[in-house]
Amino acid sequence: MPDADYAEAKELYELGKMRLSDLAERFNVSRQGLWKKFKKDGVVYGSRAAEVSAAVSAGVKQAVTSTVGQQVSQALERYNDKRAEWIEETRTSGYKSLKQADMLAKKIVADAVKNSASMRTTDDDLKAVARFQKILVENTLTRLDILRANDMIDEDDLPEIHFEDLTDEDILKHHRENGLIEEGEDPDAILAELNNVEIDD
């Protein structure tokens, strides 16, 4: 039996992939002769089967991790896409609900005045409205906190920065207005001096 065939047969046997009879048939050797050779070399059936199991587990784990990672990434993208919309919706609905509660409180007071009733008669109703308002505020703030609304920056709200080169005239004007140069000084000399100033890092 050639060395290459024996090495392959040994590998298959130790990994538990093929039995003696299968190997004998595959490599066209006697089962007995192969067994003697394995016994002499201390080859044990399935002794390296754990390697296959570990490799399979690692492959499955990698596939699962990759899939989960993709799913998490997609979920985050969907969340971020919707987040600004949810924040705006929460603020709008919270404002509308509080406005309704405010109108309800005003109606209770207006009805009491219209019916010439004592304001004490409105206490229970106004307390109920106040509790309702408190719940609305807490719910709105909680939702905004969960959505991390304070961390959300709208690109349209960012300040714009414009860089412009100052002309010599602009520089001289600035220095004059801040009393850094006197009226009689030579503008060319001042500009030459300013341009030669080294700026320390």
Image: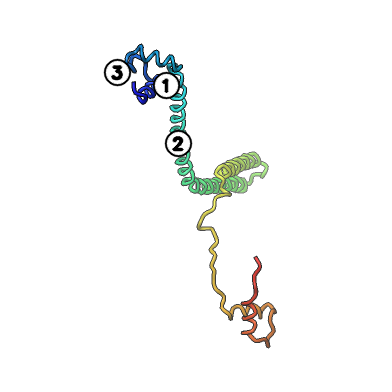
- Front-most of residues 33 and 168: 33
Q: Can residue 103 be seen here?
A: no
Residue 108 appears at what percent x and percent y?
Answer: 60, 45
* Number of marks in picture: 3
Q: Is residue 29 above or below residue 158?
A: above
The quadrant in which residue 168 appears is bottom right
Instruction: State which mark lies toward you, 2 or 3.
Output: 3
Instruction: State which mark lies toward you, 1 or 2.
Output: 1
Which residue is found at the position 45% from the left and 37% from the top? 71
In space, the residues marked 2 and 3 are separated at their CA atoms by 43 Å
Residue 68 appears at what percent x and percent y?
Answer: 46, 35
Q: Amino acid at mark 2?
A: Ser
Q: Is residue 162 left or right of residue 59?
A: right
Earlier in the chain: of badge 2 and badge 3, it is 3
Earlier in the chain: of badge 3 and badge 1, it is 1
Q: Which residue is mark 1?
A: 15
Quarter of the C terminus within the rendering: bottom right
Q: Amino acid at mark 3?
A: Asn
Which mark is drawn over residue 144?
none
Which mark is drawn over residue 28?
3
In space, the residues marked 1 and 2 are separated at their CA atoms by 28 Å
- Front-most of residues 121 and 10: 10
Q: Which residue is mark 2?
A: 66
